[in-house]
């Protein structure tokens, strides 16, 4: 692998990997062949499939999900986030360096620089893995304990699950009330957003109503299941990790646990670096594959 001149391909925005195999496989799915497409239980069928996918990772361990018995189809984690804002606007907060979507919606209005700033009896929406670290937030244990003490409901954006390795998460913490999982990042389905919301208790709002009346996007459920069957859970890590390791070693980058994100030290501070273009370039030009 020739990696001397790849620094120009690093980006400030850590864009998730998108594998050409995802695109090619998507193009091959021209007809709906699964019985779930016409089933009244298509949502339940899809939710069970996603649960199997989450538990099937050989590189990560996700537990405690059985405590979240209310499961609904969502159009990606973005709908999960929008639903939370719609039902809790003015009483839901995020932390600095989380998903940029929050700032694009409301600037810094609901962004906290420190968890101790959060109001009692409010809500916290936090990504796990956390985008700045590409890993579970380094202060996650304290965040959850503090929220439990302040009666703050925690909602987990788990969109990056499917891109990670060596992550062990037990979701069964009493502070956590809901989790949004998506196939967008791990299986390249950002253009056909589909996922599942896990909740401890029944949650009011558009997602619940849509699922109660089976107003779900069945073609996208079927599409997602086909991708799960074809690629499994750890595809991106299995395909690109050797390139990622060498890239980080050659350019003095610090590995994260997410395949599209690394870090470098700049003036004594950690700075995220997006490496997707560099990894795509390395894979495309690896002569040893031919």
Image (cartoon, grey):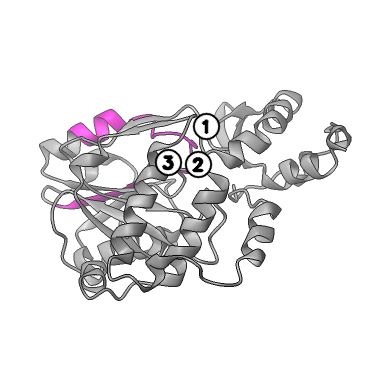
> Residue 266, percent across and down?
62, 31
> Residue 235, percent across and down?
59, 41
Q: Mark 3 points at which residue?
A: 130
Q: Name the residue under label 1.
A: 257
Which mark lies nearer to you, 1 or 3?
A: 1
Relative to 210, does residue 201 appear above or below in the rendering? above
> Residue 46, percent across and down?
36, 58
Which of the marked residues, 2 or 1, is nearer the chain's N terminus? 2
Q: Give the range drawn in magenta.
A: 122-145
Q: Gap in Å between the C-alphas at discs 2 and 1?
A: 15 Å
Q: What element carries label 3?
A: loop
Q: Name the residue under label 2.
A: 233
Q: Is residue 255 visible?
A: yes
Report how many numbered discs are placed on residues in the image. 3
Q: In which quarter of the image is the N terminus?
A: top right
Q: Gap in Å between the C-alphas at discs 3 and 2?
A: 19 Å
Q: Is 137 part of what is drawn in magenta?
A: yes
> Residue 11, percent across and down?
67, 47
Which mark lies nearer to you, 3 or 2?
A: 2
Q: In this view, does 192 lie to the left or right of 2?
A: left
């Amino acid at each position: 692998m020739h990696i001397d001149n790849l620094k120009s391909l690093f980006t400030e925005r850590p864009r998730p990997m998108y594998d050409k195999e995802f695109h090619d496989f998507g193009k091959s799915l021209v007809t709906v062949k699964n019985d779930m497409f016409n089933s009244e239980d298509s949502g339940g069928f899809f939710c069970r499939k996603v649960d199997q996918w989450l538990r099937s990772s050989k590189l990560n361990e996700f537990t405690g999900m059985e405590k979240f018995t209310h499961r609904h189809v969502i159009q990606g984690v973005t709908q999960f986030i929008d639903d939370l804002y719609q039902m809790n606007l003015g009483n839901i907060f995020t932390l600095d360096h989380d998903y940029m979507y929050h700032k694009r919606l409301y600037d810094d209005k609901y962004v906290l620089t420190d968890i101790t700033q959060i109001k009692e009896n409010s809500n916290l929406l936090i990504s796990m893995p956390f985008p700045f670290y590409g890993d579970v937030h380094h202060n996650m244990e304290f965040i959850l304990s503090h929220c439990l003490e302040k009666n703050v409901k925690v909602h987990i954006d788990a969109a990056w699950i499917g891109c990670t390795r060596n992550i062990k998460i037990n979701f069964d913490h009493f502070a956590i009330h809901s989790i949004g999982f998506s196939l967008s990042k791990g299986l390249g389905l950002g253009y056909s957003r589909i996922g599942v919301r896990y909740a401890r208790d029944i949650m009011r709002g558009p997602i619940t109503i849509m699922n109660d009346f089976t107003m779900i996007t069945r073609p996208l459920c079927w599409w997602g299941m086909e991708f799960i069957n074809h690629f499994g859970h750890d595809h991106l890590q299995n395909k690109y990790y050797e390139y990622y390791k060498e890239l980080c070693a050659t350019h003095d980058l610090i590995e994260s646990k997410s395949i599209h994100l690394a870090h470098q030290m700049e003036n004594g501070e950690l700075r995220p670096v997006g490496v997707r273009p560099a990894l795509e370039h390395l894979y495309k030009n690896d002569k040893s594959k031919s």
